[in-house]
Image (cartoon, helix red, strand yellow):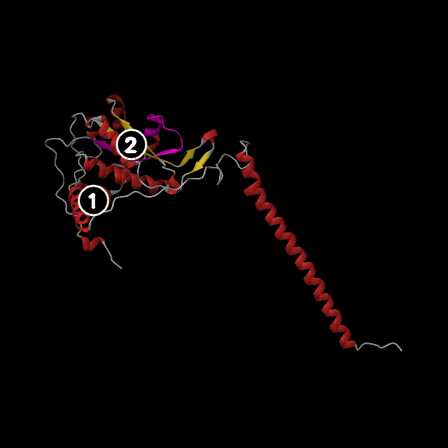
Amino acid sequence: MTQILDPKMTWILLSFWAALLSYRSAKVNHEEHAREQWEAYLHKHVWRRQICSKGQTSDDGDWVESGEEEELCHVPYLGSRYPVEVMVQRSQDFYNLMNQRRSVRFISPEPVPRQVIDNVILTAGTAPSGAHTEPWTFVVVSDPEVKHQVRLVVEEEEEVNYRHRMGDKWVSDLQRLRTNWVKEYLDVAPYLVLVFKQTYGIAAGGKKKTHYYNEISVSISCGLLLAALQNAGLVTVTTTPLNCGPKLRLLLQRPANEKLLMLLPVGYPASNATVPDLTRKPLDDIVVHV
């Protein structure tokens, strides 16, 4: 005799099988989706990297891919460690030296040894940079005619800046420092150092290479450059003339990936040089210990 299932039990069994089939279908779809994602990852990060490593061209445009560069070996750090009393004295001596640093607009035309400038630039090049891309170019100008061309570009734009772009408050704040758009030191200083940031690099084969934190990296190098100049007994004034970058880049024949960040006239201080009688903030105003 055939046993007839209770309708309620039948509904429960059918619901169970429907749920089981739905789960298995969803699981298959999920596994297929995961497999597709994994294959896409392999295609992008493994297969195409193998192509690049064999010297062929990848289809990712003109930029260098991650992993294309050689691995770096790591070596022991060989820094110096000093006794505490020596550390304190060295830190005090260095502060005393740097506390004499001033922005000097009266610069002597007296020649400065080229080797000193080269050493100062090398020091600036020891700065840290994003992924060690070293995104800086230091253009050192000593040719009198080129220096004068730089001055003409800067003064033309600076006059417009002072008269129109900067605004009354900015110009008023600079009055006590006695600055204006006339930059005689650009002709007089034996060297002009124009610091360019490389917004991206150019790798072998012409591909573009990402330069991480390029402006911050170059700004740090400028700080070391100022310290190195002070250490050598030279002076400068940091200038960032508005809207001069494109013209100066063309004048100095720099590539499109370089943007002017800072312009520094460099030399000995003039015998009659003066500076504003400024004071610096005390330690308590600039430090917070936690």
Name the residue type under label 1: Asp
Residue occupying image coordinates x 75% and y 73% = 11
Q: Is residue 140 visible?
A: yes
Q: Is residue 76 left or right of residue 59?
A: left
The disc at residue 88 is none
Secondary structure found at label 2: strand
Report if residue 248 lies within the magenta region. Answer: yes
Name the residue type under label 2: Leu
Q: Is residue 259 left or right of residue 231?
A: right
Q: Residue furthest right?
A: 1
Locate residue 119, reporting x and y percent.
25, 32
Residue occupying image coordinates x 58% and y 40% = 47
Earlier sequence position, callout 2 versus callout 1: 1
Report if residue 7 lies within the magenta region. Answer: no
Locate residue 229, reporting x and y percent.
21, 35
The disc at residue 194 is 2
Dot in front, 2 or 1: 2
Give the magenta part as a residue range: 247-266
Look at mark 1 in the image and give the residue it sits on. 173
Q: Residue furthest left?
A: 272
Secondary structure found at label 1: helix
